[in-house]
Structures are given as structure tokens and as C-alpha cells.
Image: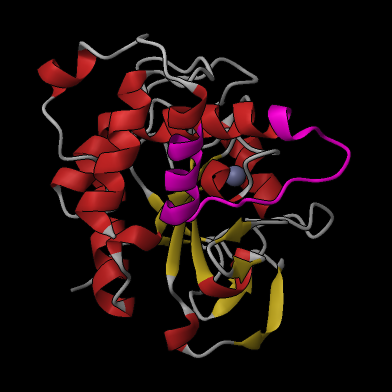
Amino acid sequence: MALKTILNYSPNFNPKKRPSKQIKFIIFHYTGMKNESNALKRLTDIQSEVSCHYLIKNNGEIVKIVPDLYIAWHAGESSWKNYKSLNQNSIGIEITNPGHEYGYKNFTKKQITALLKLSKFLIKKYKINAKNILGHSDIAVLRKKDPGEKFPWKYLFKNKIGIWHTLNKRDLIKNRKLETSKIEENIFFNNLFKVGYSKKYKTNISKNKYLIKLAKTFQRRFRQELVDGKIDQECLIISKNLIKAHN
Ligand SMILES: [Zn+2]
């Protein structure tokens, strides 16, 4: 299967090549910049010290920025299950979008089509587990919001990319905003840790603040219609389903 890309290489990668079996994750990002050409400039500028493997432009073109077998600099300080610094084990895909800071937009149809094609290509090539297809915010809860609540996780899941819950939407929505007890909250967070989210937070932030951020991160990924940081029955039910359906 051939993949049509445009080459625009970045100098920002580790010089040592990695074996292909080291690639276990795909991490999705949005560029979070006002305009696309500046995003591409930044990803290829030696001063910026950031990069990714692919950039998906607004028009659906896929730009190859760092070859797969070199470690690109997209994830930063990050953690998932027992993995730390996920750059080493991942392919990073940036998608043009101004992001939460500059007017978060829907991803374009052409971007989603390209995303599907690229993801399928990589999953097949490196035999990537559906559970290892993540957003930047999933692995950097305190620092990141991307790719955010407009990212088409459910649609991707229907196409065998990544995970999603298997619950009926109409039944599920009845549980929205219904309160949970303290015990249920604990169950919810334990489920998230089982899924892979980090338990650790920096000492300069309270545990409570971290858990609110974590709840929002979960919602951006799995309950995208309402990101309020409150753990309601709907969130709890989804977390239980994720464990049952995918662990
Ligand atoms: Zn990112």
C-alpha cells in the first residue's frame, strides 16, 4: 500500500535510528497555531526543537516531516501505563487546527479522510494496538488539550482506529449530570488509571487539581459533548465500559 506524501523534512530528531518494533504508539496532535504555514515553519525550524512525523494540512495533504524510524520531538514530558517520554515509542501526527488558544475549529473532511488513510497505513505497517492510539492530552494531562473534543475519536473507532465505548448513546445520555458519590469517583479514577492514564502529578499542584484536569482530559476523549471536569454517572458508566470492552 503506497501512501502519498509531500516531503518537507525537519532537522529536529534524534540522530540514532530506532528499530521498527520500538514503534508502539500513534499520538495525535493539533498544531495550535493561527496559520498553517507558520506551523510548518515551526515544525521544521532548528530553533524550535519541535517536530513530528507527519502533518495533515487543511486540504488533506500529508507532509512527511521526520522519517518513521527516527525519533521526532512531539510528545515532550509524557506518560502512559509504564511508558515514559513517549517520543521514543511513537509516531507523532500533527493536524492543522488553531486549537483552543486561537479559535478551535472542526477538523475538515479532507483532514479526516487523510487521517484515516495515514493511520491505517501505520497500524498495518507497525502492528499498532488500538489501545495505543492516543491524543497528546492523554499522555500529558497537565500540559496539553490537543487534539481536543472536536477530534473524531468515535468515527476513527468505527474504522478500527483507537478505542471508544460500546454503549448506546440514547441510554447513556440519561446519565449526564447525575451526581456520583465519593466512592464512585474513586472507581472512576481507578478505571482511568487501568486504561493507562498517569497516576502521578507534580508536587506543585494539588491532587484535587490534577484529578479535575484528568476528568477533563477523559471527557475531551470519551465524552466530548460536555467537558466540565465533573464526574457524573455518564462518565462513570463510560469508564466501566472501557475497562470491560478493551482490557
Ligand atoms: Zn501536541
| Residue at 74 percent of width and 46 percent of height | 201
Q: Which region is colored magenta?
A: 186-209
Compared across the picture, whether 80 is left or right of 227 comes to right
- Lateral position of residue 118 relative to residue 31, left or right: left
Q: Quadrant of residue 184?
A: top left
Please tell me which residue is depicted at 43% across the width and 41% down the height of the picture: 57
Camera-nearest residue between 167 and 101: 167
Residue 190 covered by magenta stretch: yes
Q: x%, y% of residue 220? A: 45, 29
Residue 71 coordinates in the image, percent (x, y):
61, 74
Residue at the image position 72 percent from the left and 56 percent from the top: 77
Which quarter of the image is occupied by the N terminus? bottom left
- Along the line of sight, which residue is nearer the eye, 61 or 117? 117
Measured from the top left, where is residue 168 in percent x and y? 11, 27
Looking at the image, which residue is at 65% across and 20% down? 101
Tell whether position 152 is magenta.
no
In the image, is residue 108 above or below residue 113?
above
* Image quadrant in which the C terminus is located: bottom left
Q: Is residue 55 visible?
A: no
The total number of labels drawn is 0
Vertically, is 146 above or below 40? above
Residue 186 can be seen in this image: yes
Q: Is residue 146 left or right of residue 176?
A: right
Ligand 1 in which quarter: top right
The colour scheme applied to this rendered structure is secondary structure
The location of residue 175, given as percent across then percent down, is 26, 14
The image quadrant that residue 74 belongs to is bottom right
Q: Nearer the viewer, residue 242 or 86?
A: 242
